[in-house]
Image (cartoon, coloured by chain):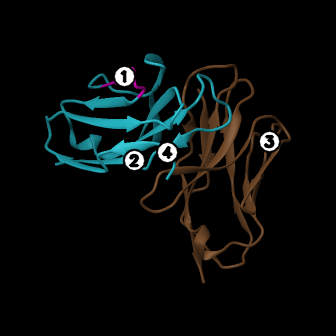
Chain colours: A brown, B cyan
Amino acid sequence: GNSVTQMEGPVTLSEEAFLTINCTYTATGYPSLFWYVQYPGEGLQLLLKATKADDKGSNKGFEATYRKETTSFHLEKGSVQVSDSAVYFCALKEGGGGADGLTFGKGTHLIIQP
Amino acid sequence: DSGVTQTPKHLITATGQRVTLRCSPRSGDLSVYWYQQSLDQGLQFLIHYYNGEERAKGNILERFSAQQFPDLHSELNLSSLELGDSALYFCASSPVLVNNYGYTFGSGTRLTVV
């Protein structure tokens, strides 16, 4: 079956540091890949997505590139802010036109210190 | 505000009881997905309804059931509740049956079983 593995947190960084959160996946076919963010007390918000190999998703300074050869979709940001503190989820949607929902990783809690 | 409305926000009930969680999708969205977020299992897809019909099932227990009504709102029914059912329950909506571009999540219902 499908699965998503992401680095466990918490990840604690200082403001303006470089961020990488690793995500690897196992899936049949060609899935779409997503990063969602969850702020305290809120639901999940779509941060960025990529639907095919070598696509780069980007939003709010965050980027992730769909690497089929390494089955990875690592999240990066060049300079984090305190407001980026949240839980980040990597997820996949199986390709092929199925109606199943998303498969999520366990989430990475990111803490940015001023 | 994502446009996906979930009620109630919090629910406390006793073991063995039955509860109903409600989700109103974004205006125009025909698909509703239900997810459970717990500390041990993470985020898991439960079930997907499209325009009133069940279209996919994930890791949904037999004690749980859902339906989608003609006005497109959906209800998740949880019965014979156990302590382990305590979790955040999210719904997400999408305009189409098969969406490879990401869904819109509600802010969730926190269920506590005591």
Residue at mark 3 shares a chain with residue at mark 4: no
Residue at mark 4 shares a chain with residue at mark 1: yes
Whether the residues at callouts 2 and 3 have beta carbons within 8 Å, the answer is: no
Q: Is residue B16 left or right of residue B43?
A: left
Tag 1 residue: B69
| In-front residue for pair B51/A79 | B51
SS category of the residue bearing label 1: loop
- The stretch drawn in magenta includes residue B76: no
SS category of the residue bearing label 4: loop
Tag 3 residue: A70
Q: CA distance from mark 2 to mark 1?
A: 19 Å
Q: Nearer the viewer, mark 2 or mark 3?
A: 2
- The stretch drawn in magenta includes residue B67: yes
Tag 4 residue: B3
Q: Amino acid at mark 1?
A: Phe
Q: CA distance from mark 2 to mark 4?
A: 12 Å
Task: Please report the residue visible at 38 percent of the width from the left and 27 percent of the height from the top.
Answer: B60
Q: Is residue A94 left or right of residue B28?
A: right
Residue A91, horizontal then vertical, whole percent: 61, 41
Q: Who comes first in sequence, dot 2 or dot 4?
A: 4
Q: Which chain contains the residue that carries disc 2?
A: B
Q: Amino acid at mark 2?
A: Gly
Q: Is residue B100 left or right of residue B46?
A: right
Q: Amino acid at mark 3?
A: Thr
Q: Which residues are magenta?
A: B65-72
Task: Please report the residue visible at 46 percent of the width from the left and 37 percent of the height from the top.
Answer: B44
Q: Quadrant of residue A75?
A: bottom right
